[in-house]
Amino acid sequence: MDRLQAMEVFTRVVDANSFTRAAETLGIPRATVTTVIQNLEALLGVRLMHRTTRRLSLTSDGAAYYEHCIKILAEIAETDASFQVGNRKPSGTLRVHMPGSLGRRLVIPALSLFHQRYPDITLDLGLSDRAVDPVEEGVDCMVRIGPLEDSSMVARRIGMLRRVTCAAPSYLERYGEPTDIAALAAHQAVNYRATHDGRAIPWVFLVDGKPVEVRMNGVVTVNDSDAYVTCGVEGFGLIQPTLFMVLPHLLDGSLKEVLTDSNPKPKPISIVYPHNRHLSAKVRVFAEWIAELFESTPALEGGEPWRDDVLRRQARPTRGQLVA
């Protein structure tokens, strides 16, 4: 028996939670997967998993063996990659998933630069705000916004997303402009619903360096970031989006920033991948490239030059206005 192949088959069955799906991803018959697992259990003298017609579950021995397998396989893959990177450029298909707004507004416009640098990598880019299981869907890495709660993922922080509190001028004409956080109780907001639990995400401000959570009343709740901004522009209520999403609207006046002295808590942005997958050369170079991209984007983190741009545009005379 090829022990390394058996380890790979075993870990793939556990990750996919299915003999059939494991066989499909490995490109081998299902019967071969079954035989490999049976021979592995016979060799080790222990039962690795409980199998029924509906589900699989690891035994305590199986769970311990799985943890050892993924470490061994990762070390072998990293060793091979360390020699291969020096001999050839990263290549192959890289499946990446990220929030739609981030991909459309920041990543896709810069992709030509990535392909100039790494012409042998083919990107399969998935864009949506839904939660993704990278093992089930065969995703190599993901870009995620916000705190990470999944301990099965390895994460690298690649930036911070600045946020602003703003509203359409039509909304502010009806409700007035809030002067402090306490005044938000008298205002309406467009609420954003989290995809993983369906609850509206609370607003969080930093006051004296400490987070202060605020629950907002609203008549509209959405689960899509583009819809969230559109509802704000249409005057349905205050919104607290990431700056890169609304900078064009702040510059053209269709949205106005409020509570400029009360900064919303920034959101971390990370590139993540399953802990049982080695950091391949193509994942590594993509992570480095996207970190450079975000670092060079002022709307994500840094100083306040965008506010100066807003003030300059507001000060420009409109067509037909007389200037002394």
Image: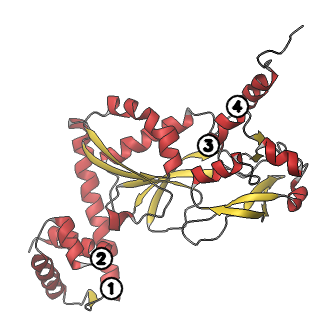
- Amino acid type assigned to the residue bearing label 2 in the image: Val
Q: What element carries label 2?
A: helix
Give the residue pinned by disc 3: 245
User: Mark 2 sits on what residue?
Assistant: 14
Please report whichever mark, 1 or 4, sits nearer to the chain's N-terminal start: 1
Given the current orientation, which residue lies at the most extreme front position? 320
Query: Looking at the image, which residue is at 29% across and 53% down?
Result: 78
Secondary element at image label 4: helix
Mark 1 or 2, nearer chain start = 2
Of badges 1 and 4, nearer the viewer stands: 4
Q: Give me the C-alpha separation between circle 1 and circle 4.
A: 57 Å
Q: Which residue was labeled with disc 4?
A: 252
Q: Is mark 3 on a helix, strand or loop?
A: helix
- Asked whether disc 1 touches disc 2, contact meaning CB atoms under 8 Å apart, the reply is yes
Q: CB under 8 Å between callouts 4 and 3?
A: no
In this view, the mark in front (3 or 2): 3
Q: What is the three-letter code of the residue carrying label 3?
A: Met
**Helix, strand or loop for disc 1:** strand
Q: Looking at the image, tell me whether mark 1 or mark 3 is earlier in sequence order.
A: 1
Which mark lies nearer to you, 4 or 2?
4
Say which amino acid is labelled 4: Asp
Left or right, 227 with reference to 314 = left
Along the horizontal axis of the image, is 18 left or right of 234? left
Residue 270 in the image: state x and y as whole percent.
52, 52
Label number found at residue 58: 1
Q: Which of marks 4 and 3 is nearer the N terminus?
A: 3
Identify the colour scheme used. Answer: secondary structure
Image location of residue 281, percent across then percent down: 31, 45
